[in-house]
Image (tube, rainbow, N blue to C red):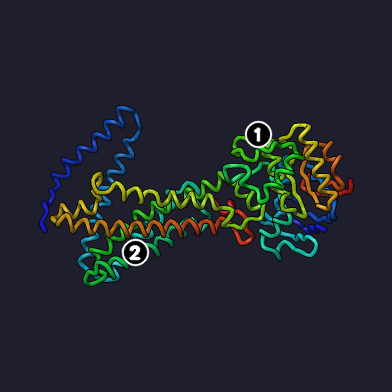
Amino acid sequence: MSYISLSYWDLALAAVLILANGLISLWFRLGLEKSLLINTARMLVQLSLIGFVLKFIFAQTSPLWTIGWALLMILVAGREVMARLTTRLKGWWGYGIGTTTMFFVSSFTTLLAVGLIIGPDPWYAPRYILPILGMVLGNTLSGISLGVETLITTLKRERSSVEARIALGHKRFEAIDEPLRQALKTGMMPIINAMAASGIVSLPGMMTGQIMAGADPVEATKYQILIMFLIAGATASGTLLSVVGSVWRLTDDRGRLRLDRLE
Amino acid sequence: MLKVRDLKVHGLEPISFDLHEGNVLVVRGPSGSGKSLLLRAIADLDETSGSISLDQMSKDGEAGGHWRTRVRYLAAESGWWLERVEQHFTDLAAARLLGKDLALEGKLFGSPVAHLSSGERQRMAFIRAIEDGPAVLLLDEPTSALDEEAGQRMEDKISALQKSGVILIIVTHSNEQASRLATHVLTIKDGAAKVVSA
């Protein structure tokens, strides 16, 4: 495989494009210049550092470094889920539900991929585990946050209908049936739509990368299909677990609705 | 008999009282004094302390859902979860019959919930609350959205339930309604609740 290495001058040239954003912001007085500047700088620093960190971890090829870095990725993804919610569960649960779910779902799918399907030698080769985990996490985190966010906003909006059912003697999962279905649907929709669009409209990122690095497009597609399946499975089970977990927390063993457990 | 002992409702002193079959307790007090919270506590919709029992059945010894089929709470604002009214009833024929008593036309049952007026929804929710024959009814302002005619019919229905042995606890802002229905009155004043015979 061969690819064309980029010089820093090449990047500087591309950076000119970001000026377009700044000009639009100034022209229409959007007030975005400051956050544009800060976030561009953030991206630069984060991505350059990650390049060096990954280079270091790849050079170690030790299970400890790989797993340690994987855990850090999961923790950060959990924080991102929490940050995307407009209303969170109180206490540990606000961070815990999303993070725990992602821990189980993403490690299961990633280990399935490297252990049984791809089979790199050694199995903990960071070159495979970490990018796959990253792609799985990135997608499950949006499924989980969409699902839980929908659940919470629907429960708040539909409180009187849910409580009417509870007052009529319906059991907890019966009474929240509608908000639950709404939440699961919303959480799983993006990945289903992504499968439809991928191919002609969008060449998914991983496949693009492999092709530019010189891989045979047919081989790259096979990897992309594998990833799509992993992502779809992880998103569905992650959304289910986190939404059901949130329902569990937002109702109690007396069958009551417990919106007081929200911040 | 409904036995309430040391029931702790947010912002109120612990409340205790007994009600027998056919008793109607009217709850009086200024807005925001905790009248609705009292009803919710009895229906076990909020976390509270204290004990409540109905005949041999104690609230905490039963599954929440079972308690609430015997002790039925009807909120001031009715809640609906399916599109059409009729989908919310278990026995539609019986519900239609009750509807006649409350001046609800039969065709309303087939309508989408959103097409009903608030008064129609209030009466429909009342029918839904009594269709499975609860022993205790907790009514939060049951006639607030009704005109005089419909309100009268609702009161007649409430009196009929009382005669059949249902225990009722009713929150109302109307003095006339209170004096017409009450066998007992619970007055909330300065955080203390007192029950007296009417």
Q: Position of residue B155 (x, y in %)?
A: 80, 40
- Label 2 resides on the chain identified as A
> How many neighbours does mark 2 have within 10 angstroms: few (below 14), some (14-19), or many (20 or more)?
many
- In the picture of the structure, the residue carrying the numbered disc 1 is B117
- Residue at (50, 48) in percent of width and height: A87
Q: Which structural element holds mark 2? A: helix
Tell me which corner region of the image, top left, top right, bottom left or bottom right, holds residue B151. Answer: top right
Query: What's under tag 2, amino acid-wise?
Result: Thr
Quick one: A8 or B97, which is closer to the camera? B97
* Residue B178 left/right relative to B117: right
- Figure label count: 2
- In the picture of the structure, the residue carrying the numbered disc 2 is A109
* Residue B21 left/right relative to A84: right
Tag shown at residue B20: none
- Residue at (54, 53) in percent of width and height: A177
- Which of labels 2 and 1 is toward the front? 1
Q: In which quarter of the image is the C terminus of chain B?
A: top right
